[in-house]
Image (cartoon, grey):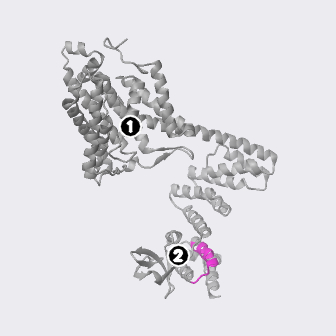
Amino acid sequence: MLRKILILAATFQLFGLPPEVEAQTQDASQANSALEEIIPILATARRNEVPDLVEIIANSQDSRRRPFLESLLNGQIYFTRDEERVVKVLRVDDQFQINDALSNEELGLVGTRAVRRVSVNNSLRRTIRLLIAGIDLQDDDPQVRLSAVEYMVAQEAAESREQLLQLQSEESDESVIQAIEEGLALTDLSSKDASLRSSALDKLAGNLNSTIRNSIRDMAENDPDPEIQAKAQDVLYSIQSKVELYGYVQTLFFGLSLGSVLLLAAIGLAITFGVMGVINMAHGELIMLGAYTTYVVQQAFPDSIGMSLFIAIPAAFLVSGLFGILIERGIIRFLYGRPLETLLATFGISLILQQLVRSVFSPQNRQVSNPEWMSGQWQINEVLALTYNRLYILIFCFIVFALLSLLLKKTRLGIEVRAVSQNRAMAKAIGVRSGWVDALTFGLGSGIAGIAGVALSQITNVGPNLGQAYIVDSFMVVVFGGVGNLWGTFYGAFILGIGNKILEPWAGAVVAKILILVFIILFIQKQPRGLFPQKGRGMEE
């Protein structure tokens, strides 16, 4: 009986005062004392009384109500068995650190049996979340209010209608007003008035929100009015069409993302393979070295992840490029004209490089962290989101390709590389040092492979076998696009990337790769020199 009297008294104090006295209750000290009278009742309240107490707490004007409700939602509110004092609990090893539930004053460490949790079931959790959302409707930040409205809409809570109507009359932010209108229209979908349901359908036509879409689908299947049901079916069809369209856009983005990865992995190989005709089976390990360079740089600058990525790009280029020059000067230059021996030699080098990183870094994969600006996703609408890491890699890929194109077209090295690739004998005859060009070209291609490793470290784990996953795909891109042709590699990478992602949903990842491989085999039978065959007097007719 005492508990009920206290509850009624607290309720009366908050809601039932005469108008002349109600103004005085706005004083902060009175609001705080009201909350301090209510919360201790939780220690002795029965389970069915807790929801009423929680609503009283939420309806108070005390600034501490939201943190308290969040702690209650997270299962951190307990009461002491001896004093029946409501406290906030944090586990410390085998004990609990208890703090005052409102003031957060530290009360010391106690054993786990000295306190008991305030019972919160799933139904009450939903109520608390809605009450917190109701509190957020009064926040000064429009984004907080928008999130609160969106949560209420997602929950389809009928009790939220009055709160939304009240906020609508006071709201000035356009995005919040639109969300409120959608929420009110959603509640009208379940109205008994057919005209209200019809009007709600007009307002929600084209809306991609999953909760709204499900409600319209339910109307399209079960509405008692045949005309409203037919209208709901038309609205649902238009929404589904938009969902499918954005699904195609998402697939295209995934295809472009895969294409950018393939281009970065293959572009260095296209240069070395096109100029020297070397089948470099160690190309994947040069990509791996770039990825491990990113890991090392990040370990050297643990407090500046974003800056370490920009340091890793030139560092990876130099490390992989120097390894490439060493491989060319030390082994490959003695094997020109013997493709089979070159293939076997570079395959052996790939095994040596794999064992080298296993010995230095261990066989375990290494995690490279994404900078904050590359984490998360760009949520364009309810059904379309683009991940930032893949979006930035796509942009990075275009930048690398543009710089490489300028290098090959506007610099002396680029002119000599193109001359050697088109007619090696004639280039030698006019004074081009083909050996020097071969070394720098192999170093350039290897350096770009290292840059590809930097990009790959942002979307996958770094391990000794990283390069093996991309070496076959790189050769496929180069052969399909045209050996030695930069633009052929560009188009080939994106055609194969998009084609792979289009096939994956209905064929599966493995079958899609097989189908792509079969397509390339058939294409090469018809066009042996690829999409864009290399041109020059030295080329075979």
Circle nearer the N terminus (1, 2): 2
Q: CA distance from mark 1 to mark 2?
A: 68 Å
Quarter of the image for residue 120 reads bottom right
Secondary structure predominantly adopted by residues drawn in magenta? helix
Expressed as whole percent of the image width and height from the top left, the position of residue 366 reads 33, 51
Q: Residue at x 57, y 45 (%)?
A: 383
Q: Residue at x 52, y 61 (%)?
A: 139
Q: Is residue 377 left or right of residue 16?
A: left
Towards the viewer: 25 or 95 = 95
Q: Residue at x 26, y 19 (%)?
A: 420
* Tag 2 secondary structure: loop
Circle 1 residue: 470
* Tag 1 secondary structure: helix
Image quarter in which the C terminus is found: top left
Residue type indicated by callout 2:
Asp
Quarter of the image for residue 537 reads top left
Residue type indicated by callout 1:
Tyr
Nearest to the eye among marks 1 and 2: give it.
1
Q: Residue at x 43, y 40 (%)?
A: 391
Q: Is residue 29 magenta?
A: no
Which region shows up in magenta?
44-57
Circle 2 residue: 27
Expressed as whole percent of the image width and height from the top left, the position of residue 86 reads 50, 80
Q: Is residue 329 left or right of residue 495?
A: left
